[in-house]
Image: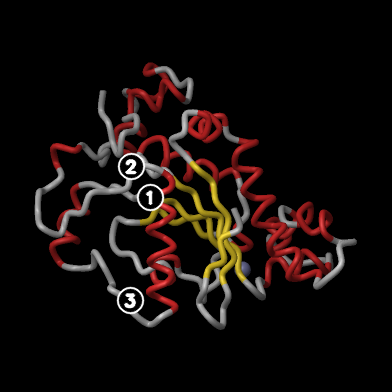
């Protein structure tokens, strides 16, 4: 069995996903998709190679520490050397996956002070758990071995603001805004600031959606191999408040 971060490799992922090898395993698409599958043996042993967290709590702690360094102006900019570049060209072992907003002010690697190969980041306006986002996160966890998914919302999120207003939107902007509206409705009658309440509600709603929509993610959670956490990023201070 190929194990990554104590996780399943390709064959077991396919089993987990209920996909037969006849369907995908030997196909051209499959070979392209999986050819970068990491194997522990390929990982170069260097002084910069740090042991990856093997449980969700350690991954969360690493994000908290990184954000603390960012807020305090003590960034280490880890894992950004030429050596790290070479290491990660061979394999990747992201310790966490982020479902974050595409907003230009919330780049996950910077606000969590991480480097190459550390985070598997899915960014889409409003950090919505779309079908493609869920698929990406299934890959990040079941195949690459990330044991934490952080759903990261942020203050003054334009997508959430649009969802609170409910006005018609051009093109396909309305597509992701629609996916935020159920979260807004949960807090529409709540006291306090609707926008701020909606940002929190949207993180919680999208996090719930991940578990509800994906049998793969649900299975990993049940096995104790995955935790889904929520966070709210403050644009002014740079601080992430962890919600769960
Ligand atoms: Zn946003």
Q: Which comes before the other along the chain, label 3 or label 2?
A: 2
Residue assigned mark 2: 54
* Residues at marks 1 and 2 touching, judged by CB atoms closer than 8 Å: yes
Nearer mark to the viewer, of 1 and 3 = 1
Quarter of the image containing the N terminus?
Answer: top left
Distance from disc 1 to disc 3, alpha carbons, whole Å, reads: 19 Å
Question: In the shown orientation, is residue 15 left or right of residue 87?
Answer: right
Name the secondary structure under disc 2.
Answer: loop
Residue at horizontal 18%, vertical 60%?
84
**Cα–Cα span, label 3 and label 2:** 24 Å
Q: Residues within 10 Å of mark 3 (few under 14, many from 20)?
A: some
Mark 2 closeness class: few <14, some 14–19, many ≥20 residues within 10 Å:
some
Q: Residue at x 37, y 58 (%)?
A: 62
Seen in the picture, residue 131 relative to 8 is either above or below; the reply is below
Query: How many dots with numbers?
Result: 3
- Residue at the spot of label 1: 58
Q: Is 183 displayed left or right of 220 in the figure?
A: right
* Proximity of marks 1 and 3: CB atoms separated by less than 8 Å: no
Estimate the x, y position of residue 165 in percent, counting from the top left. 83, 69
**Which residue carries the number 3 mark?**
75
- 205 vs 229, left or right, is right
């Amino acid at each position: 069995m190929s194990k990554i971060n104590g996780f399943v490799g390709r064959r077991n992922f396919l089993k987990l996903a209920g996909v037969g090898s006849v369907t995908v395993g030997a196909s051209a698409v499959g070979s392209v998709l999986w050819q970068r599958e990491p194997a522990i043996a390929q990982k170069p042993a260097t002084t910069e190679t740090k042991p990856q967290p093997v449980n969700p709590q350690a991954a969360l702690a690493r994000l908290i520490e990184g954000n603390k360094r960012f807020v305090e102006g003590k960034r280490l900019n880890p894992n950004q050397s030429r050596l790290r570049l070479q290491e990660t060209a061979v394999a990747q072992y992201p310790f966490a996956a982020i479902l974050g907003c595409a907003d230009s002010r919330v780049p996950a690697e910077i606000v969590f002070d991480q480097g190459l190969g550390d985070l598997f980041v899915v960014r889409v306006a409003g950090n919505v758990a779309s079908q493609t986002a869920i698929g990406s996160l299934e890959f990040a966890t079941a195949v690459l071995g990330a044991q934490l998914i952080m759903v990261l919302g942020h203050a003054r999120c334009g997508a959430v603001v649009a969802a609170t207003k409910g006005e018609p939107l051009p093109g396909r902007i309305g597509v992701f805004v629609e996916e935020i509206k159920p979260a807004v409705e949960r807090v529409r009658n709540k006291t306090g600031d609707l926008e701020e309440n909606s940002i929190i509600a949207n993180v919680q709603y999208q996090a719930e959606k991940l578990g509800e929509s994906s049998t793969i993610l649900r299975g990993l959670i049940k096995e104790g191999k995955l935790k889904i956490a929520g966070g709210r990023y403050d644009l002014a201070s740079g601080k992430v408040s962890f919600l769960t």
